Amino acid sequence: MTLLDRPGRSDPLTGGERPLLRVSGVKKSYTTPQGPLSVLNGVDLSLAQDESLALLGESGSGKSTLLHLIGGLDDADAGEIVLDGVRVTELPDAERAALRRESIGIVFQQFNLVPSLTVSGNLAFQARIAGRFDAAWQNELLNRLGLAGLEQRYPEQLSGGQQQRVAIGRALAIRPRLLIADEPTGNLDEATGDDVLSLALDLIRRTGCGFLMVTHSTRLAARLDRQVVLASGRLAAS
């Protein structure tokens, strides 16, 4: 991997404490029948270790696109993304996949659970692939997420809230450096969504990872440490 200088965890650009995540001048556009569509026009963002940040913006503003770039799921046209000293934007596909397995937990709105695996199997899925399965941590996740006793059930036997808890547990099972979530409560009713977010924030504090969440809800966003708004391809504080 292409690394920045790790000793002391200082930022070579500022000389101060290096952020967990730094996004600098990131641009992204897509080809359409009408011509190029510019989505991100030079996004700058930083996130400290142990910090939670809500990303707000209208539908189609590029929130999910930015999340996918940070997670190494897509390529930026320009700019730089650095996660814990690793220049994500310079990594080849295989090394970006390894970074996701080992350092990034991703939670999607659609849950994306493996239907043929039980709760326990889904929870352990990413951790086993990364070679970081920890039985004690899995049991703690099951208990803290209210999934104890449901270990042998399959996704189709769970409620929406229970499925999203499994998805969050799966993402946290590797003890990621960064957890990113794209509208993680978007398919849940308000009460269930509040409950799921509370559990997620509690476990994030337990692991000490950074948390970046895309949401349309200013109410939910207010529960995180900071809020930024994506508009016209750039970020501004809310």
Image (cartoon, grey):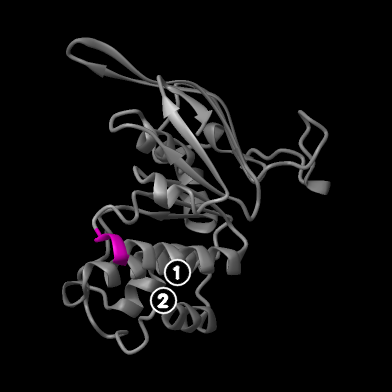
Taking the spot 53% from the left edge, 37% from the top edge, the residue there is 91
Find out whether the residues at labels 2 and 1 contact each other: C-beta distance under 8 Å: yes
- What amino acid is found at the position of numbered circle 2 in the picture? Leu
Where residue 110 appears, as percent x and y from the top left, is 25, 55
Taking the spot 24% from the left edge, 61% from the top edge, the residue there is 189
- 80 and 129: which one is in front? 80
Q: Which residue is the site of mark 1?
A: 199
Where residue 51 appears, as percent x and y from the top left, is 61, 51
Please tell me the numbered disc located at residue 145.
Answer: 2
**Relative to 207, residue 3 above or below:** above
Where residue 161 appears, as percent x and y from the top left, is 28, 68
- 78 and 208: which one is in front? 208
Taking the spot 17% from the left edge, 13% from the top edge, the residue there is 33
Q: Is residue 38 magenta?
A: no
Q: CA distance from mark 2 to mark 1?
A: 7 Å
Q: Main secondary structure of the magenta part?
A: helix
Please tell me the numbered disc located at residue 73.
Answer: none
Judged left or right of residue 176, residue 59 is left
Where residue 88 appears, as percent x and y from the top left, is 55, 38
Judged left or right of residue 6, residue 91 is left
Q: Mark 2 falls on what kind of element?
A: loop
- What amino acid is found at the position of numbered circle 1 in the picture? Leu
Residue at the farthest top position: 35
Mark before the other along the chain sequence, 2 or 1: 2
